[in-house]
Every structure is written in structure tokens, then in C-alpha cells.
Amino acid sequence: GGAGRGVARAWGQAYVCLLALVYISCFLFSKQAYAAGGEPFDCNWIPEDGGANATEHDLSRLRVASFNVEWLFDGVDDPHYSPWYPGKTTCPGMKHCGTKEGAQEHISKISEYVKLLNADILNLVEVEDCNILRELISRSDISEYWPLLKKGIDTATKQNVAMLTKVLPSEPLYRLEDKQAYPVEGSKCGYENSSGKRTTLSKNYVAHFRINGMTVAVHSLHLKAFPKDPYSCAKREGQAKIAQASIQASIAKGHEVIVFGDFNDFSYEYLDVQGSVPKSDVLKILRDADSDGGADLVNTMESLEKHERYTNWWDRNSNDVVDGTIEYSQIDHVLLTPKLATYVASVEVFHGYDPALVSDHFPIVVNFNFGAGHGA
């Protein structure tokens, strides 16, 4: 009787433990196998093991970064705009341009700085596909990272925005697919058009996180290049309007908001190191989510001294050398809802490399401290 039941209980417990071990082992194996390789656009899903990868997060600190990694492609069948396309003579690192070898060296170099940044949530701009993200995880040796990418619609450059994260969102990334007529009402870009042109937001994603009881809606943007060109300026304002509607919808639901990425435009309120003045209203549009004339989002540039405000190098004379601050500007930004901004412990732009050798952008990093009572 009793002895038999004891043996049965012991066997039952052992069986349950064995099942749990098999489950965990299978998950870890599948994650490792997934990280080792796959299809170019198969990495927009969230593992559901309910354990270490739960999507409800209680955090005392959080480190968020956005990094334009300049043409992070594999050098195989790249578009002709790519610096790794055969025949190209200028590229990040200035060695083996126009070759697969140069592209692979670039991935390794970027991986070093991904490891050094060690962000919990890392937004990446100008990424080719999921396989590039997996290479970054492998070469940076940050096994906690989970890659996420929702394929964009930039058919010319084939660039995408993507995420590496240690903190899982509550659902896969989604894209804003709306279209917007431009120039927008009141535009001062100097671009006139009567043919009813409309733009998409070709490179974007939205992610939702559950952090300390808050839903945080994260918007990643890579807007149209060339800050002072009238056509690009007008189109970029149209793209900002698409993002603005989503930001306002998030705020209306009571969500906190982070907007980060390469906006390709300057701040009207916090001038950068060379005092760049925006031609467009892109930052105003994004910050004034409800279009009432007031700012609903905080620009984290306010935490930086003027001499620190640069995230981009433009080699204006194409000599492959940085010729002082005249070639620097700040076009990458992180915007926050006011409540989230109260938790900001520090903001920095990491300037620890020669942009001619790594990327023509520098990463911007925001550190949050949510205080005692979280992350125990």
C-alpha cells in the first residue's frame, strides 16, 4: 500500500521533471538552431515558453539604443546602391569596397560595437534581413538577444529597420501601411506639387512591450534622406504624418511611447553641434501627436550638451576624412512620452570610433532607472 504509493509518487515526480527538462531543452535547442540560420525574413515571432522569455517585465533598469549601422548587408546580390555592390570604391571601413569580403568585415566591426553598447532594446537601421541579425547575435556573443524584423517596402535600397532585444515584446512587430498626401498643409519645404502625390512610410515598425505595468508602444522610423532638399523635405513631412497618427492612437489608449530611429532631420528646439536649422517640421509633427500646437513627446536631446549633439557624419567633400564638426549633425533621435521621460537616468551619443571606419552614424543611448520596487 503505502510503499507502493510512495514509489508511484516518486515515479510521477520524476516523470514531470523529465518532461520539464525535455521542454526546456527543446526550447533552448530550437532557439540556438533558429539563431544559427534560417530564411531572410522569418524572424518576426515571439517564443512562448512562459519562463525566462515571458512578455510581462518587471525591470529596475532599461537600456535602449538606436543605431544606424550603414548598409549592414551580406554582399551577395546587393542592390546597386550598396557600397558592397561590385565596382563601388567607397564604403564603411574603406577596405574591400564592392566585395562580399568587405561586407562581412563590416558585419564583424558592427558586432563589436553592438557588444560594447549592450543595450536591452537595440533599434537597428539599414539592415538587410534576419540572417544579418543572426550574424550580429553570433559575432557579438550576446546570446540573450532575440532578433525581430518585419520586412519593409523600400524596393530601391532593400534596407530595413530591425530590433535586437533581451526584453521580449508582447506580440510580433507590425508596420504602418498608410499613405499620406504631400506636401502637407502649411509646409515650408518649398516643394510645390499639384498632382496629388502620396507617400508611404517604407521603413518602420511598431512594437508593444509590457514593462512595470505599462504598455510601451515603440515606433522605429527611417525617414526620407537629404534634410535640405525641398522634395525630400516635403515627402519626409508626409511620412512623419503617418507616424504621428499612430503615436496619437497609442497615447489615446494610455500607452507610453518611444519613437526612435534615423529621422534625417534636425531638432528645431535643441540645435546640434553645428547649429543645424531644420527646413521641415518633421520633429514638430512627431512631437505634437494631437496637432494642437503643443509638444506631447520629449526630445531626449535636451539632456545633451550642444557639443555632444551629433549622430551623423556627412563627408561633404568626399575625402574619406572627418574635417571637424562642420561635417557632424544630429538626425537620429529618441522621443518619449513625459511619464517615461521622468525615468531617464542618462542620455548619451556614443562617439567612440572613427565614422569613416565603422558607420557614418553614431548610436544614441537612453538609460532608464525605474527605481526601487522593480526588478527584484
Image: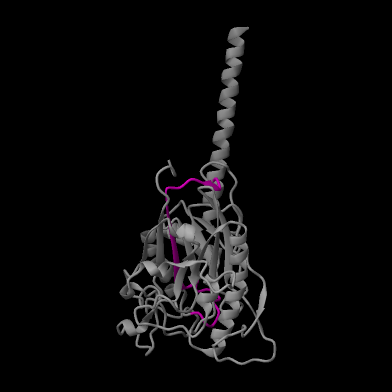
Residue occupying the far top of the picture: 1
Residue 294 drawn in magenta: no
Can residue 221 be seen here? The reply is: yes
Q: Where the N terminus falls, by quadrant?
A: top right
Give the image location of residue 279, x and y in percent.
49, 85
Which residue is located at x 59 percent, y 18 percent?
Answer: 9
Number of numbered callouts drawn: 0
Q: Along the line of sight, which residue is nearer the eye, 234 or 261?
A: 234
Which residue is located at x 45 percent, y 47 percent?
Answer: 59
First to last magenta residue range: 54-82
Way the structure is coloured: one colour
Give the image location of residue 13, x and y in percent.
57, 23
Q: Where the C terminus falls, by quadrant?
A: top left
On screen, residue 118 versus residue 6, left or right, reads: left
Give the image location of residue 175, x and y in percent.
63, 66
Q: Along the line of sight, which residue is nearer the eye, 98 or 267?
A: 267
Which residue is located at x 53 percent, y 78 percent?
Answer: 282
Give the image location of residue 348, x and y in percent.
36, 65
Residue occupying the far right of the picture: 195
On screen, residue 350 versus residue 81, left or right, reads: left
Which residue is located at x 62 percent, y 57 percent?
Answer: 253
Residue 63 drawn in magenta: yes
- Name the image quarter holding residue 252: bottom right
Can residue 128 be seen here? The reply is: no
On screen, residue 239 versus residue 137, left or right, reads: right
Q: Along the line of sight, which residue is nearer the eye, 140 or 145?
A: 145
On screen, residue 334 versus residue 18, left or right, reads: left
